[in-house]
Image (tube, rainbow, N blue to C red):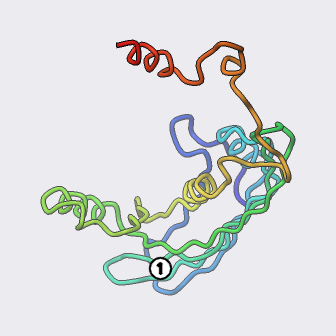
């Protein structure tokens, strides 16, 4: 279970650093975020509830003090329907496969990309290893935030709105209809 300590006000919403400083073999783990952490992330993302958030991971060493992080983030959450504002329960499963590099190597890559051009950057930017640690909590929050449905809809919810101004009798169909009438008087 991940520590329930509050994240710093200016820092990540979730935090759980894993040391990889002297890691020579692959390491597996599972983070199950507690009630307080899930509530903090739900409030930050303005979702109704985050009932479960789990990050199963494998960190395998590569060359040059780099690592491959693979795994799966899974969650159960409730958001409000964008049409009806009714609660919509969702389940999320997101595969993860990223490289983790020491911060100084990422900075060198950024300088190279600035000199050569953005084509020098990898398609997926590497996750920083800072002080020999990877913050899996911050990474889990980022992956979760990018994976949730930005427009949750209840089944069969239809958005059927018409501008009441356009329904008024004698009102032109568009803002340019009046201009078209002026042009035709020439």
Q: Which residue is mark 1?
A: 23
Q: Residue at x 80, y 57 (%)?
A: 90
x and y percentages locating residue 30 in the rendered image: 69, 71
| Quadrant of res 16 | bottom right
x and y, in percent, of residue 107 in the image: 26, 58
Q: Residue at x 62, y 79 (%)?
A: 28
Using the image as rendered, state which of residue 93 and residue 126 is in the foreground: 93
Give the quadrant of the C terminus.
top left
Tell me the residue at 65%/72% (across/down).
Answer: 72
> Which image quadrant is residue 31 in?
bottom right
Q: Is residue 47 left or right of residue 122?
A: right
- Quadrant in which the N terminus is drawn: bottom right
Quick one: 3 or 123, which is closer to the camera? 123
Toward the viewer: 97 or 2? Answer: 97
Q: Eyeballing the image, is 12 above or below 57?
A: above
x and y percent of residue 115 in the render?
A: 13, 58
The answer to which quarter of the image holds residue 172 is: top right
Q: Seen in the image, is 3 located left or right of residue 182?
A: right
SS category of the residue bearing label 1: loop
Disc 1 packing (10 Å; few <14; some 14–19; many ≥20): some
**Left or right side of 154 for 22:** left
> Horizontally, is 159 left or right of 69 in the view?
right
Q: Position of residue 159 (x, y in %)?
A: 76, 40
């Amino acid at each position: 279970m991940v520590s329930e300590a509050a994240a710093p006000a200016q820092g990540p919403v979730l935090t759980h650093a894993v040391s990889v400083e002297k890691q020579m073999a692959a390491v597996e783990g599972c983070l199950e975020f507690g009630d307080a952490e899930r509530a903090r992330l739900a409030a930050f993302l303005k979702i109704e509830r985050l009932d479960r958030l789990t990050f199963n991971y494998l960190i395998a060493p590569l060359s040059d003090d780099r690592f491959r992080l693979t795994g799966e983030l899974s969650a159960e959450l409730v958001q409000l329907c964008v049409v009806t504002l009714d609660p919509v329960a969702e389940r999320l499963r997101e595969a993860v496969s990223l490289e983790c590099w020491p911060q100084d190597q990422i900075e060198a890559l950024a300088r190279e990309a600035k000199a050569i051009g953005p084509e020098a950057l990898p398609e997926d930017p590497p996750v920083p290893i800072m002080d020999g640690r990877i913050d899996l909590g911050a990474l889990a929050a980022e992956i979760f935030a990018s994976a949730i449905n930005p427009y949750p809809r209840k089944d069969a919810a239809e958005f059927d709105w018409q501008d009441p101004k356009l329904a008024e009798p004698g009102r032109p169909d568009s803002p340019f209809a009046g201009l078209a009438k002026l042009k035709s008087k020439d």
